[in-house]
Image (spheres, rainbow, N blue to C red):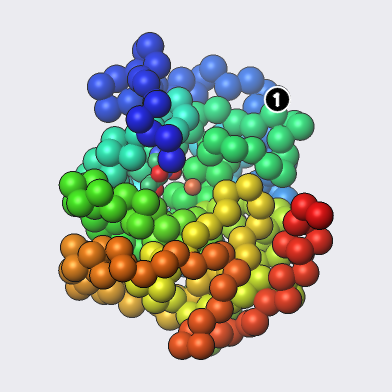
């Protein structure tokens, strides 16, 4: 991310937070949340990991309207010690990591416009809150997010933020998980997207490959369209354990000697759940 160019807007605190100013949302903005919520609530049962639905319930997120971060944080604090704080948009990597390491999730306060129903570049309150917050009520996932923030602060010192960002991308944003009932969604970028919550699970196009820390840190990702590969974890416990137990410094050094992998590449040693046709990506490719 072009973090060097981000400068702190007037009216933001030192840590880039702003008041959510919940009372200032218009009826149309609340209605936009309700519309997005209804669409995802209809899509997700049987697709999303049950822990996500449990989080929605525990946090009472089915109440109409954009959630008030204070009320949300109060419930979340009781469950796992996390809070939700408002920011104007993207914040620099270091600021982002610092918040996560202190169990604060930064969420955009704005909501998308009607012409951005299916795609927008900066994370809005629907992506950030509907997508990310429910799993923060899960103790193991909550600890993983903190560990990620701490890892980010260390990666910064090692010049390895881009590597670590791939871990976030392919787990927190676009992760799949294997459960007894089959593959399920848990990544916030998927569960907050109508199109991708179907594509990631049902479409023949993308690869679905077993998670490996080193494998995924070598893999480039696309930010402008559906993913060409999704990585499948065995459990949140396993994800947290690998993240905590791995010594990242030697891992980053080892990675320096290896070429990056394209998003669609499949390796002989991969555990392949689905070998994708890549039909979707090819149909879109220029030429
Ligand atoms: N800022 N508001 C916000 N939300 C993010 O998800 C975010 C960010 N800044 C940096 C960032 N993500 C990523 O570059 C890190 O995961 C590396
Ligand atoms: Fe996100």
How many labels, in total?
Answer: 1
Give the vertical position of 92 relative to 23 (above or below): below
Task: Answer yes or no: is residue 57 visible.
Answer: no
Q: Residue at x 55, y 28 (%)?
A: 110
Q: Secondary structure at mark 1?
A: helix
Pick whichever, 38 or 212, lies toward us.
212
Q: Residue at x 55, y 44 (%)?
A: 127
Q: Residue at x 28, y 74 (%)?
A: 242
Q: Quadrant of the N terminus?
A: top left
| Left or right, 196 with reference to 77 | right
Residue 248: % across, % down = 22, 65
Task: Answer yes or no: is residue 204 visible.
Answer: yes
Q: Dividing the picture into quarters, in which one does residue 4 lie?
A: top left
| Left or right, 215 with reference to 250 | right
Residue 206: % across, % down = 66, 71
Q: Quadrant of the C terminus?
A: bottom right
Residue 163: % across, % down = 35, 57
- Quadrant of the image where one finds ligand 1: top left
Q: Residue at x 32, y 50 (%)?
A: 161
Pick whichever, 1 or 38, lies toward us.
1
Disc 1 residue crowd, few under 14, some 14–19, many 20+, Cα 10 Å: few
Beta carbon of the mark 1 residue lies under 8 A of ligand 1: no
Pick whichever, 188 or 230, lies toward us.
230
Give the vertical position of 259 relative to 59 (above or below): below
| Left or right, 272 with reference to 243 | right
Pick whichever, 201 or 270, lies toward us.
270
Q: Which residue is mark 1?
A: 28
Residue 196: % across, % down = 67, 58
């Amino acid at each position: 991310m072009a973090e060097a160019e981000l400068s702190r807007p007037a009216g933001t605190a030192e840590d880039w937070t702003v008041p959510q100013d919940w009372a200032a949302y218009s009826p149309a903005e609340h209605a936009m949340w309700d519309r997005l919520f209804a669409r995802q609530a209809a899509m997700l049962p049987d697709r999303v990991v049950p822990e996500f639905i449990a989080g929605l319930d525990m946090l009472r997120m089915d109440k109409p309207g954009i959630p008030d971060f204070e009320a949300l944080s109060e419930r979340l604090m009781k469950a796992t010690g996390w809070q939700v704080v408002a920011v104007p948009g993207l914040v620099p990597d270091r600021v982002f990591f610092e918040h996560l390491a202190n169990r604060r999730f930064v969420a955009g306060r704005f909501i998308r416009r009607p012409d951005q129903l299916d795609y927008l570049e900066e994370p809005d309150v629907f992506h950030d809150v509907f997508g990310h917050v429910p799993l923060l009520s899960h103790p193991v996932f909550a600890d993983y997010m903190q560990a990620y923030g701490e890892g980010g602060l260390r990666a910064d010192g090692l010049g390895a933020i881009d590597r670590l960002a791939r871990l976030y991308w392919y787990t927190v944003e676009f992760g799949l998980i294997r459960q007894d009932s089959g593959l399920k969604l848990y990544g916030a970028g998927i569960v907050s997207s109508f199109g991708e919550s179907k594509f990631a699970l049902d479409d023949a196009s993308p690869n679905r490959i077993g998670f490996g820390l080193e494998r995924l840190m070598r893999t480039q990702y696309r930010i402008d369209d559906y993913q060409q590969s999704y990585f499948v974890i065995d459990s949140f416990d396993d994800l947290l354990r690998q993240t905590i137990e791995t010594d990242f410094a030697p891992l980053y050094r080892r990675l320096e000697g290896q070429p990056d992998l394209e998003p669609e590449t499949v390796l002989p040693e991969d555990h392949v759940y689905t070998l994708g046709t890549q039909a979707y990506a090819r149909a879109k490719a220029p030429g």
